[in-house]
Image (spheres, rainbow, N blue to C red):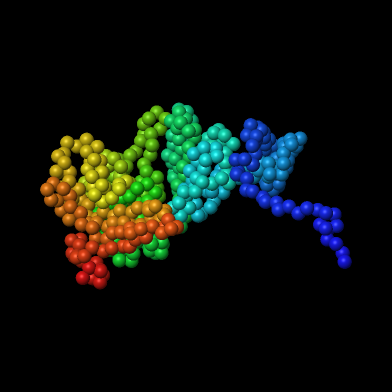
Amino acid sequence: MSKSFVSEFDVKEENITLNDVPDYEAFTNKELLDKLRNEIIQNLIDNYQNTNDDIASHIREEVNKTIEGYDLDVIERAYINNLIDNEINGYGPITELLDDPSITEIMVNGTNDIYIEIDGKLIKDDSISFINDEHIIRTIQRLIQPIGRTIDTSNPMVDARLTDGSRLNAIIEPLSLNGPVLTIRKFRKELEGIEDLLRNGTLIPEMARFMDACVKSKMNIIVCGGTGSGKTTLLNVMSSFINNDERIITIEDAAELKLGQEHVISLETRRSNYEGTGAITIRDLVINSLRMRPDRIIVGEVRGKEAFDMLQAMNTGHEGSMTTLHANGPKDSLNRLETMVLMAGMEIPIKAIREYIENAIDIVINISRLTDGKRKVTSISEVVGIKDDEIILNEIFSFKQTGITKDGEVIGEFVKTKGKPKSYERIKSRGVDDLSDIFE
C-alpha cells in the first residue's frame, strides 16, 4: 500500500492562517515609501512620451526599475504598484472610494484614520491609508485644482463642489490641530425619486401624496433636519412635483439640486477672491432672482441674512417657494428663522417677525437620520396661526419610535393626526382634490 507524502517523510501538518494586514501596516517604512513614491512620480513625468504604449505597463516598468536593489517583499511591491497607479490615474488612496457608488461620504481624519458612510452608517476603513500629512494635502490639491481652488497655509480652508457635483470640505493647519482633514459628500449620479424614498421606508404613500398636493397647490415649504439627514434629497424629490410649465429659479452655495423640468434657472454663489472682493452671497442671488420673473424660488439652504429676503419673496406673490435649514424639529426651525431675520440688521419687533413668518410659511417638514442610519420624515406640520405671540404648529403626520431591535434597527410607525388639517381646504380650493380618502 503506497504511503502519502506526509506519512512517508513524517511532515507535520500546520494550520496556516492568513490575517488581513491593515493598509497602513503593509509598508511600514513610511520614509522610504515617500522617497520611492516621489522618485517614481518624478521619473514618470521626466520620461513621459505621448505614445500609444499602455500606460499601465509603463508605470509598472518604472516602478520595477526604481525599486530594484531594495529589499522589499511581495506585499510591499504590490502596495507601491497600486499606490503609483492610483496617484497617476486617480486621486491617490481614495480613488476606489470615489468610484464606489455604495459609499455616500468619505472622511479622512489622518493618515491612518479614514471613515466612510454606507447606508447611513459610519465605518472605519482600514483598507486604505496615506503616507503622511503632505500626501493628504497633495490629494486635496489634486481634487480642487480642476475647479480653480487651492489650499495652503494662507488659505487653510476650502469648501467646494467637485466637477461631478460632490461636495468637498478640507481644512489644514494651523486651523486644524489634527493635521489635514478631508470630507467628501458624494453626489449621486442617479438622484432618488419618491419611489426610492417609499421603498426605503423614509415615508408612507399618504405622506407622499400630501406633499405632492402641497407643492402643486403652491404652499411655501421649509424642509428642516440635521446634517446628513437628507434635506437636499427630499427637497429635490419635492421639486420634481412642480408642473413643467413653471419658471423655477434654484439658488445654492454648491449646486446639488437636479430638476427635470424644462424651465429651470440654476444660480450658484461665489466666494471672494484673493483680494477679499467679488463675493456673491445667497442673499444677493435671492434679491436678484426677484427681478427674473420666477414662478418658484427654491433656495438650497438658508443660514443667515437671506432668510428675510426669502420670507419677503414668499409674502409678495412668489408662492410655492421652498428651502431647507438646519434645525432639530419644526418648532426649532421657526425659532432659527426668527434669529436669521434678526441677523439681517432689521430693527423689527419679535412680534412683527413672527407674524411675517406665520404669513409666509405654510408647511414645515422635518427629516431625521435615526440611530440605525436610516432616514425618516419624522414630522409634517402646518402653520395655523399665532396665539399669545407664539406661532402655532399643527402636526399632520409623524413618526413615533417605539423601540430598537437587537440588531440596532429602529422600531416605530408613521401616524396621521385625527381631523382635517387647515391646509386641506386650501389644497382643495387650488383644484387638487385627491386626498379625500386620507382626510375625510
The N terminus lies in which quarter of the figure? bottom right
Q: Please, which residue is most extreme toward the left here?
A: 388
Q: Please, which residue is most extreme toward the right here?
A: 1
Give percent across and percent down for residue 180: 49, 35
Q: Residue at x 29, y 40 (%)?
A: 304
Give percent across and percent down for residue 398: 28, 59
Give percent across and percent down for residue 376: 35, 57
Vertical order, 377 against 87 (above or below): below
Q: Is residue 401 left or right of residue 311?
A: right
Q: Residue at x 38, y 34 (%)?
A: 272
Vertical order, 112 against 277 (above or below): below
Quarter of the image for residue 27 reads top right
Vertical order, 251 against 219 (above or below): above
Q: Is residue 117 left or right of residue 198?
A: right
Q: Is residue 210 left or right of residue 371?
A: left
Give percent across and percent down for residue 412: 34, 61
The foreground one among 249 and 323 is 323
Number of marks present in the image shown: 0
The foreground one among 117 and 409 is 409
Residue 255 appears in the rendering? yes
Residue 155 appears in the rendering? no
The C terminus lies in which quarter of the figure? bottom left
Q: Residue at x 49, y 33 (%)?
A: 179
Q: Residue at x 41, y 64 (%)?
A: 199
